[in-house]
Amino acid sequence: MKQKSIQLLSAIVKYFNSAFRPSLMGHKTGDVIAIDLNTAFDEKEREWILSDLGIDKDNPEGKGKVRPGARAVGTGQWRCSRRSPGTAGIKPFDSPNGRMMEGPGGASISDVIVRNGLRKSIFRAYTYPYMDHANLTVLTGALVRRLLIENGTAVGVAVDHHGQEREFRARGEVVLSTGAVHTPKILMLSGIGDHELLDLYGIPVVQHLPGVGRNFQDHLAVTCVWENTKIDARTMSCDAVMFWSSNSGSRKPDLYACCGPIAAAATPENIARYGPLPDMPWVMYGALTQPESRGYLEITGPDPKDPVRLVDNTLSRDADLKKAIACVEMMREVGNSAPLKPYLKREVMPGNLKGADLTRYIRDAGVTYWHQAGTARMGRGPMAVVDANLRVYGVEKLRIADGSIMPALTTGNTMAPCVVIGERAAHELKVAHGV
Ligand SMILES: Cc1cc2nc3c(=O)[nH]c(=O)nc-3n(C[C@H](O)[C@H](O)[C@H](O)COP(=O)(O)OP(=O)(O)OC[C@H]3O[C@@H](n4cnc5c(N)ncnc54)[C@H](O)[C@@H]3O)c2cc1C
């Protein structure tokens, strides 16, 4: 425990010492990208992205892959400090993606795509450059009500568009990509799901697939809060990230945390107990990489406006709770250690809690990392919803391409994996239709 803590700590102190403070550069929520896909982009995409990041396109470091974020805007001090003798044996990484998550863990400044001081959405980074293509139409203000399915084949979608119901027919296939909450909802409203639930709401069953809406997973986040010594712009993104393994015998990191002056620092329950947050909070935002708990979601009626009922069941497994405790202990050890003293005035919460008090704190502190996944899982067997080619079982010409198809959560954040799922869907469509 001590050794790991020292390694992580060194990396975080370097982040504090670094001239580069990514959090100061972005404050947009919901469109965060931490991405190093090692993806071979075509020349146009590559040039567009690199110019957007202000990188010289002939810079060899950028060649052939997206390598944005901290590296792009300059982390000179970070890189220098990595080479200093004091860091020998420490596991700081240039990027949190790839080896760091797949090996024993480590710490890194976050990779982000930033333009004009704002973090950029995956839509802006990925789709926007193609908006002038004749084969792409983006219709905003359109709510998909259900799939149109004829004789077991998906032929289009029924959509509410500015108060009017319209139908769009597909010549090739329909690809549902509405996320891990709305994809199962639309499937159920279209008659694809557990027949008992569909019968309850009078929805004609097109395909009995009991796995739709099951296997819900998310990274549950628990925060520890300190008072910062200086004013930082509060953000929804993190500055540095670390992955480590608890003492559970796992060889892969089973815990992770990001840190920074993150706006969503604490839940109302814990603020009620500890008092208002300081003006300058600094937060460690910890989570289990691979929670064992599984939840589910269901429709509550046949109308698209009926909300879903989501039962997330987080921390319902003892093993998850034990890991959450280990996570908080490590975050406190790092946050309260001597090298961070010049940067942090005091610990705000949780303090030195043990036993039932700590468990209560964790249960009250739990919030979503917004990494919902798994509700239309890929695989074989009765609970699988899509096959290895993203095709929905039992319905022709219907694929799913979003976080719902993940059988299990990825170790780290979910945006880049969802992009990979989208790339995979594109590949499958190209192959299937000879594009
Ligand atoms: C606040 C926040 C912060 C995050 N931070 C990070 C981060 O730092 N790094 C990271 O890797 N990931 C982050 N994520 C997670 C990441 O954004 C998601 O994992 C990823 O976007 C999921 O992709 P998806 O394709 O499954 O679904 P989504 O990205 O949710 O896409 C689904 C789309 O479908 C649309 N839609 C849904 N229902 C309908 C309907 N009925 N009709 C029409 N359209 C519909 C939605 O509007 C949405 O545009 C964050 C998420 C949130 C919310």
Image (spheres, rainbow, N blue to C red):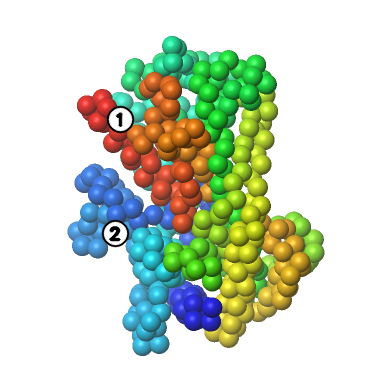
**Disc 1 versus disc 2: nearer the observer:** 1
Mark 1 crowdedness (10 Å alpha carbons): few <14, some 14-19, many ≥20: some
**Where's the C terminus, which quadrant?**
top left
- Amino acid carrying label 1: it is Leu
Determine if residue 342 is in view: no
Residue 100 in the image: x percent, y percent?
39, 66
Residue 11 in the image: x percent, y percent?
45, 76
Q: Quick one: 384 or 120, which is closer to the camera?
A: 384
Res 198 → quadrant? top right
Quick one: which residue is furthest to the top in this view? 151
Regarding mark 2 in the picture, which secondary structure is present there? loop
Determine if residue 213 is in view: yes
Tell me which numbered mark, 1 or 2, is placed earlier along the sequence.
2
Q: Residue at x 49, y 32 (%)?
A: 382
Q: Is residue 370 left or right of residue 91?
A: right
- The residue singled out by tag 1 in the image is 429
Q: Quick one: 67 or 246, which is closer to the camera?
A: 246
Q: What is the distance, in whole Å, between disc 1 and disc 2 at their CAs?
A: 32 Å
Q: Residue at x 53, y 38 (%)?
A: 375
Residue 379 in the image: x percent, y percent?
42, 38
Q: Residue at x 20, y 62 (%)?
A: 60
Regarding mark 1 in the picture, which secondary structure is present there? helix
Q: Is residue 44 left or right of residue 253?
A: left
Look at the picture and state if 427 lies above or below 193. Answer: below
Residue 5 in the image: x percent, y percent?
52, 78
Q: Are marks 1 and 2 in contact (CB under 8 Å)?
A: no
- The residue singled out by tag 2 in the image is 55
Q: Residue at x 60, y 50 (%)?
A: 293
- Amino acid carrying label 2: it is Ile
